[in-house]
């Protein structure tokens, strides 16, 4: 067996040498170069959001419910309950249980540096504007970049300003190390300077694209999977626009007989026709000295079912972003109750998950550095009661708390988001008056009473 061990040992040594060579080549070739990203990442902004009203409306519909919902800073009192509460925020949950856990796990705290940033993250933006920008880039490109390199004293201090970087222009730079591939970031069209990776936060969607080296390090744009729908809708819109300008006319104009028009006459008729079409010349008459024949070769937008196709595209794009299509008048049979449920679905399935993604992003790159600086356990959160669409759930929660006589008034206050009171009686369950255990009514009780 000695020969086998020598052979295996030799092969293992050869394999290690080859792996080391590959690693050296990777570092030599890749270090400092921009990692290629999905080439359509700019198109989702330039050819979708900026020109397609459906994409614009859907993306903003997912963002707008979150704007104006204030961020609140807390100190963690109970880590286990705080983890449970944070997990509940990631999915649909009972508001009463979440609010009760929040009351037990977190306590409001004020830290000037963090509160100042949460009000005004930089000199030209409010927090709402920064959040809108981060969420917009994330929903469109699958990426959001946060520059946090402005510090108070030195580079090891927490950030005192936050800036959003344009996601479609941000380039990841290779480190040359396959196990730690990101060496920094660059901003196309702005500077060729390398931005240290420690000064940039990157929020991204999961991306299974490994077609080019480093492509998976960028987030996947949601519209990438639906790009044919966007392209189709853009073409449909162009076709309707052209048909509208031409008053729906698509065809060939010619003389009554073959070779009846000279080339000069044909060019002259075409010039007159071009001047006559368009909305400003609707129903304008064109005269020709020669006999004229019109042969239609196109089909109207109605015959092509373009309008119906665009409705179907709206529904499909809504599915991509988990937005109910009823909110865009996609269903003529929508009732008040359906619309109310649609608005609630928008909050639970689209808005809150997006809010949670931004919350975790700010927690990691703003709150955690300051928490470490002050040696405190801090948690960034927002007020769930601010979503009016969830008011029905909150009303039901209040009614459940009101009729629950097996818990104390302080527990009811915690369920409904209020602080407990200090009176001792508030920690005892209060039973309704006039309620007597059934055992009191047994015959033995009354016989004993009469005997006395």
Image: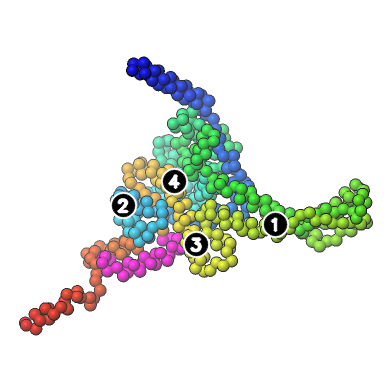
Quarter of the figure with residue 272: bottom right
Q: Nearer the viewer, mark 1 or mark 2?
A: 1
Q: Nearer the viewer, mark 4 or mark 2?
A: 2
Total numbered circles: 4
In the picture of the structure, the residue carrying the numbered disc 3 is 343
Q: Residue at 64% x, 56% y: name it.
A: 309
Q: Residue at 71% x, 59% y: name it.
A: 303
Label 3 Cα neighbours within 10 Å, binned few <14 / some 14-19 / many ≥20: some
Per the rendering, the mark at residue 81 is 2
Which residue reaches farthest left? 452
Determine whether, in the image, residue 382 is placed left or right of residue 141. left
Q: CA distance from mark 3 to mark 4?
A: 26 Å
Quadrant for the N terminus, please. top left
Determine whether, in the image, residue 282 is placed left or right of residue 15. right
Q: CA distance from mark 4 to mark 2?
A: 21 Å
Label 2 Cα neighbours within 10 Å, binned few <14 / some 14-19 / many ≥20: some
Q: Magenta stretch: residue 395 in it?
A: yes
Q: Residue at 43% x, 51% y: name it.
A: 356
> Are discs 4 and 2 less than 8 Å apart at CB?
no
Per the rendering, the mark at residue 361 is 4
Q: CA distance from mark 1 to mark 2?
A: 58 Å
Region of the chain picked out in magenta, as a range: 385-409
In the picture of the structure, the residue carrying the numbered disc 1 is 304
């Amino acid at each position: 067996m000695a020969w086998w061990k020598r052979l295996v040992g030799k092969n293992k040594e050869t394999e290690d040498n080859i792996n080391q060579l590959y690693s050296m080549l990777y570092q030599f070739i890749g270090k400092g170069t921009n990692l290629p990203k999905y080439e359509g990442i700019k198109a989702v902004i330039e050819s979708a959001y900026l020109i397609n009203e459906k994409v614009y409306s859907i993306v903003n519909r997912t963002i707008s419910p979150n704007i104006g919902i204030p961020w609140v800073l807390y100190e963690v009192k109970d880590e286990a309950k705080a983890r449970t509460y944070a997990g509940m925020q990631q999915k649909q949950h009972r508001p009463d249980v979440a609010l009760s856990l929040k009351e037990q796990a977190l306590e409001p705290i004020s830290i000037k540096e963090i509160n100042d940033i949460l009000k005004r993250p930089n000199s030209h933006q409010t927090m709402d504007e920064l959040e809108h920008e981060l969420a917009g880039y994330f929903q469109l490109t699958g990426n959001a970049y946060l520059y946090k390199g402005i510090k108070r004293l030195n580079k090891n201090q927490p950030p005192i300003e936050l800036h959003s970087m344009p996601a479609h222009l941000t380039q990841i730079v290779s480190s040359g190390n396959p196990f730690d591939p990101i060496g920094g970031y660059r901003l196309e069209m702005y500077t060729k300077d390398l931005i240290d990776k420690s000064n940039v936060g990157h929020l991204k969607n999961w991306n299974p694209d490994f077609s080019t080296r480093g492509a998976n390090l960028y987030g996947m744009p949601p519209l990438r999977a639906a790009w044919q729908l966007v392209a189709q809708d853009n073409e449909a819109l162009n076709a309707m626009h052209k048909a509208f300008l031409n008053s729906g006319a698509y065809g060939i104009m010619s003389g009554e007989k073959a070779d009846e028009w000279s080339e000069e006459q044909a060019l002259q008729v075409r010039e007159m026709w071009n001047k006559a079409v368009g909305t400003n010349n609707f129903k304008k008459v064109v005269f020709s000295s020669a006999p004229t024949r019109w042969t239609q070769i196109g089909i109207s937008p109605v015959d092509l079912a373009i309008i119906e196709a665009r409705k179907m595209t709206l529904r499909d794009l809504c599915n991509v972003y988990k937005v109910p299509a009823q909110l865009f008048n996609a269903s003529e049979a929508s009732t008040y109750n359906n619309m109310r449920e649609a608005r609630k679905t928008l909050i639970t399935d689209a808005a809150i998950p997006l809010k949670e993604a931004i919350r975790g992003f700010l927690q990691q790159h703003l709150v955690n550095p300051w928490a470490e600086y002050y040696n405190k356990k801090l948690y960034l959160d927002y007020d769930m009661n601010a979503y009016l669409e969830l008011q029905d759930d909150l009303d039901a929660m209040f009614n459940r708390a009101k009729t629950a006589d097996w818990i104390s008034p302080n527990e009811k206050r915690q369920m409904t988001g209020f602080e407990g009171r200090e009176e001792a009686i508030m920690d005892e369950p209060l039973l309704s008056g006039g309620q007597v255990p059934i055992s009191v009514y047994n015959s033995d009780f009354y016989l004993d009473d009469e005997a006395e």
